[in-house]
């Protein structure tokens, strides 16, 4: 068992990761309610199993890997259940952004564009471009080869650029 000071530090560090964790969960679940449930489950598991965190590497990577694994487990459970499913990304609640006006609208559009990409592309894009993980860290989190990370990231960037271009041309 960790001493109280280490446990409090772990919880503080976990809280600092929450916004990033929520964004990552959204790329996996495509649903705000499911993302929130997943984040809560990850936090509970991380706190109860913080003794398993060895302190090496980034806490985010450990948390993201746990998130991915829990979501895979949930998908497997849903396949067994009847009537379970996810809501299409286009039907999701708006991303709350602390900006106003044009920036908020643009952030919402980008958020929807990212979520409209297949899960593998969106997750890699968020981990590398938004959260700043290295290709190696993203590969470890997602348990895929680093070459796959590079390929998916390239594809995601090209798709996002095409979507932005298309949106811009429609406005013109």
Image (cartoon, helix red, strand yellow):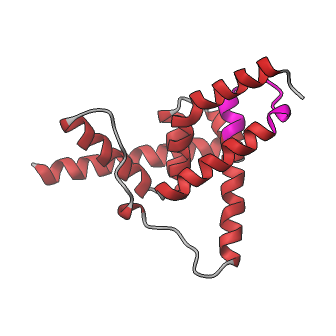
Residue at the location (36% across, 52% down)? 112
**Placement of 107 over or under 54, stated as above or below:** below
Instruction: Please give the count of numbered marks on the rendered protein.
Output: 0
Q: Position of residue 150 (x, y in %)?
A: 57, 41
Q: Position of residue 161 (x, y in %)?
A: 33, 45
Left or right, 156 with respect to 94, comes to right
Asked if the magenta segment contains residue 79, the reply would be: no
Q: Which residues are magenta?
A: 49-63
Is residue 159 visible to the viewer in this orientation of the structure? no
Snapshot quadrant of residue 139: top right
Q: Position of residue 160 (x, y in %)?
A: 37, 47
Is residue 107 visible to the viewer in this orientation of the structure? yes
Residue at the location (37% across, 56% down)? 93
Asked if the magenta segment contains residue 61, the reply would be: yes
Residue at the location (85% across, 32% down)? 51
Left or right, 155 with respect to 170, comes to right
């Amino acid at each position: 068992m960790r001493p109280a000071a280490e446990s409090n530090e772990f919880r503080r560090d976990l809280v600092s990761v929450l916004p990033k964790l929520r964004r990552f969960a959204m790329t996996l679940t495509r649903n705000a309610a499911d993302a929130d449930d997943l984040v809560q489950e990850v936090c509970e598991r991380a706190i109860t199993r913080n003794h398993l965190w060895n302190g090496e590497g980034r806490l985010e990577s450990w948390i993201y890997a746990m998130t991915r694994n829990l979501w895979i487990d949930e998908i497997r459970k849903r396949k067994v259940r009847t009537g379970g499913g996810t809501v299409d990304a286009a039907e999701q609640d708006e991303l709350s952004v602390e900006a106003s006006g044009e920036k908020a609208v643009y952030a919402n559009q980008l958020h929807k564009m990212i979520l409209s990409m297949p899960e593998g592309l969106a997750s890699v894009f968020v981990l590398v471009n938004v959260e700043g993980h290295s290709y190696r860290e993203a590969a470890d989190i997602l348990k895929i080869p680093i070459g796959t990370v590079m390929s998916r990231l390239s594809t995601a960037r090209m798709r996002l650029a095409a979507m932005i271009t298309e949106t811009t041309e429609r406005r013109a």
